Amino acid sequence: MDTNLNMPTYSMEAVKNIHDIASKIYNRQIEAIMFHESLIDLFNLLKLDGFVEWQEEVLEDEMESMHKFKKHYAKHLKGTIDKPKFNEDTDSALPREWQGKQNVVIDAKNMSMGIRYGLNKYLEWEKETVGIYKDAIARIKKDSEFDEMEAFLEKLCKLQIDNLARVTEDVEWFTKKFDYRYKDADWKNSKDASTH
């Protein structure tokens, strides 16, 4: 029995376009895993167990999202995405002067600097990722053959945007807690991240 009767057929140009878009998203997802690993390294160095746990959860979510994306691609396009082309310059959440170093002194100044650096890098990363997803959606919208892929990417992008809004609020509030003017203010959702 032929199970492919209801599968749409796509033009070669459309398949090439979607394959290029999917490869870029897949590369970003691989880079995200590397980036979140660097955040985990930073927070381990700073002995911020709550942040480590948070980033481990984010890392798991990133990996799950990547697997769903590849599965969706395989199901709807009956193919696989190219092997990722690793970007050697993938941002690290570790300050440059700490990368590859031993015996980094974590005093109050370095603790504050490390947290601010890592969290600012995280916000930059999320904003860039949202831009990549929005670009992918715009490119797919030009090709009416990919309604299902467009809906799937819009869902992914919405998750990124929602995540960015939540993370931005938490990160901005947490960094304020290192400002003496806010020392007595409520921790909100940031309290668990500071325990070690």
Image (tube, grey):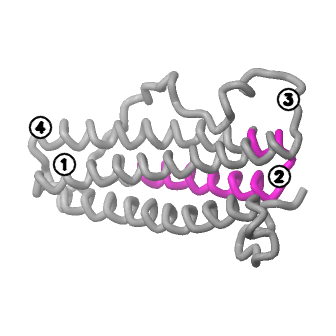
Residue 58 on the magenta segment: yes
Q: On the rendered image, what quadrant is the N terminus found in?
A: bottom left
At x 80% / y 59%, what residue is drawn? 50
Residue 194 falls left or right of residue 174: right
Q: Is residue 90 above or below residue 119?
A: above
Residue 25 appears in which quarter of the rendering?
top left
* Chain-order first, disc 1 or disc 2: 2
Find the distance from the CA under tag 2 to the CA under tag 3.
Answer: 15 Å
Mark carried by residue 48: 2
Which element carries disc 2, helix, strand or loop? loop
Badge 2 local density, few (<14 within 10 Å), some, or many (20+)? some
Residue 18 appears in which quarter of the rendering?
Answer: top left
| Mark-to-mark CA distance, 4 and 1 | 16 Å
Badge 2 or badge 4: first in the primary sequence: 4
Judging by the rendered image, the residue that carries numbered circle 1 is: 139
- Which residue is labeled 3 in the image? 104
- Magenta range is 42-69
Mark sitting on residue 12: 4
Give the spatial CA distance, label 3 vs label 4.
54 Å
Badge 1: few (under 14), some or many (20 or more) residues near its Cα, within 10 Å? Answer: some
Query: Which one is in front in this view, the residue at disc 3 or the one at disc 1?
Result: 3
In the displayed structure image, the side of residue 64 where residue 94 appears, left or right: right
